[in-house]
Amino acid sequence: MSSAAGRGTASTTPAAPRAARPVRGDTLELRIEGVAHGGAGVGRLDRYVVFVDGAFPGELVRAEVLRSKRDYANARAVEVLQASPDRVPQRCDHGGRPCPGSPWQELRYERQLELKHELVGDALRRIGRLDGFELEPIVPAVDAWRYRNKMEYSFGTAEDGALALGFHRRGQWELVDDVRDCMLASEQSNAVRNVVRNWCAQRGLDAFDRRTHEGFLRNLVVREGRRTGELQVRLVTGQGQFEHEQFCADVRAAFPHADVLWTQTDQLAEVTHGGETEVLAGSSVLHEEVGDLRFRVSPEAFFQTNTETAEVLYGLAGERAQLSGSERVHDLYCGIGTLTLILALRAGEVWGLDVVPEAIADAIENARLNEIDNVHFFAGDVRLALRPLAERAPRPDVAVVDPPRAGLSAKVVRRLLESRPQRIVYVSCNPTTLAPNARQIVDAGFDLVKVRPVDMFPHTPHIECVALLERARGDGG
């Protein structure tokens, strides 16, 4: 830098004109410089940022603009002019279309891990303005393919008018692409989907139309106990009747061990929870095993979709808690108690809290099932229930939080800090919300010690992390 520039003297050279902002429908030729949180490639027109779905760092692509804002645009790659050496062929069979559920499956897996590691560090340093922590190497998934224990398929109408059962097309939510083989689902899950689609098509049942809100078939939910071998098949429809007894008999003929359920709902939103569920055959609950523990999972209860890597994630969270057998632990957003019971094996006492009463009922039953008696579960909104919990439960030595993607609200962070734990283990599924939460906790007198990414969701941009925060020395407590 020259001395004049150092003194802040204005340059007399006129600035280059900024590129005109593109509009919807424009086609752009872009060099992809990096990747954004959420998985889109990042290109630029002069200083104008364009986020491009279906493009990877280093590639030259032709992209169609889908949406234009003042400072950025969203686009999708329509042609790859120069491919990255890390690009590989898609393995899912979606009729020649990109897989909507795993947009990174055309990226070499080792490169996926590198990018996820970089994204975690970027979020913590840029969004959270944090430094001095150890960003540990990312933990790869136990299995990179066919790892999901739960699949939610949507019914729709294919372009040729046939019944489709698969996934919403990327960027076109109202359209559903039929699926023959999803490589994230097990072979059994794929087979169930194909049997159900063919059965419904043969009987002329129509799919729910997301625009007109007409039609009967909504979703198919397939859950599997990866360790127990159990199978749950749940058909979600609108209100009405169909040959449900024959449906159940034919599904059981193909999969004799399947539990078959039918949920009727009148909700317009694309959700598989709510409504009334009837058990057509078998049981309403599925069982799964993590480590040496066995868990009951109700039809609408949350359970990590990658059983094998979840075992690694929870083991890592247990290590970060540094339990010796006497500590009191609060587990917030405990769900059905999976991590709670794992922690209880090494703690003096654990208190679990979750907003979903059905999940707490499962958690209580899971404690009984595993003969663990040093746990207590409460149903309540974490925002409102932390103070009542503090009145009933002893002050925690360790607090564990595993919030949804939105992270912790400022109020929850305040309530968490009021409980004065010495150590916080934060299990995050979104580094962009972990970062500001960690900043708030650090500002309150904690140190962010270490963060370890875990790849729970190969071939997607989603990232799981385990962060350890400890009360700074001399802060009291």
Image (cartoon, grey):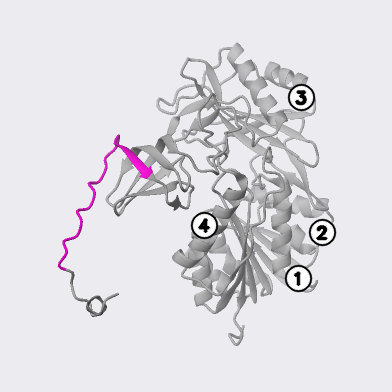
Of labels 3 and 4, earlier in sequence is 4
121 or 273, nearer to the observer = 121
Name the residue that disc number 2 marks. Answer: 372
Q: Is 24 included in the stretch rendered in magenta?
A: yes
**Residue at the disc numbered 3:** 255
The nearer-to-camera label among 2 and 4 is 4
Q: Quadrant of residue 104?
A: top right
Which residue is located at x 54 percent, y 18 percent? 163
The one of 356 and 260 positioned closer to us in this rendering: 260
Position of residue 88 relative to residue 404, above or below, is above
Kind of residue indicated by mark 2: Ile
Instruction: Looking at the image, tell me whether mark 2 or mark 3 is earlier in sequence order.
Output: 3
Q: Earlier in the sequence, mark 1 or mark 3?
A: 3
Residue 188 lies, in percent from the top left, at 72, 29
- At mark 2, the secondary structure is loop
The answer to whether one can see residue 467 in this image is no
Ranked by sequence position, the earlier of labels 2 and 4 is: 4
| Residue 332 x, y percent position in the rendering | 62, 61
Which segment did they paint magenta?
12-30
**Mark 1 highlights which residue?**
323
Q: CA distance from mark 1 to mark 3?
A: 43 Å
Pair 1/4: label in front: 4
Q: Which mark is residue 119?
A: 4
Classify residue 188 as left or right of residue 41: right
Q: Residue furthest bottom?
A: 474
N-term mark: 2 or 1: 1
Q: Residue at x 54, y 55 (%)?
A: 430
Snapshot quadrant of residue 470 = bottom right
User: Residue extending furthest front?
Assistant: 2
Front position in the image: 462 or 267? 462
For marks 3 and 4, give the one nearer the viewer. 4
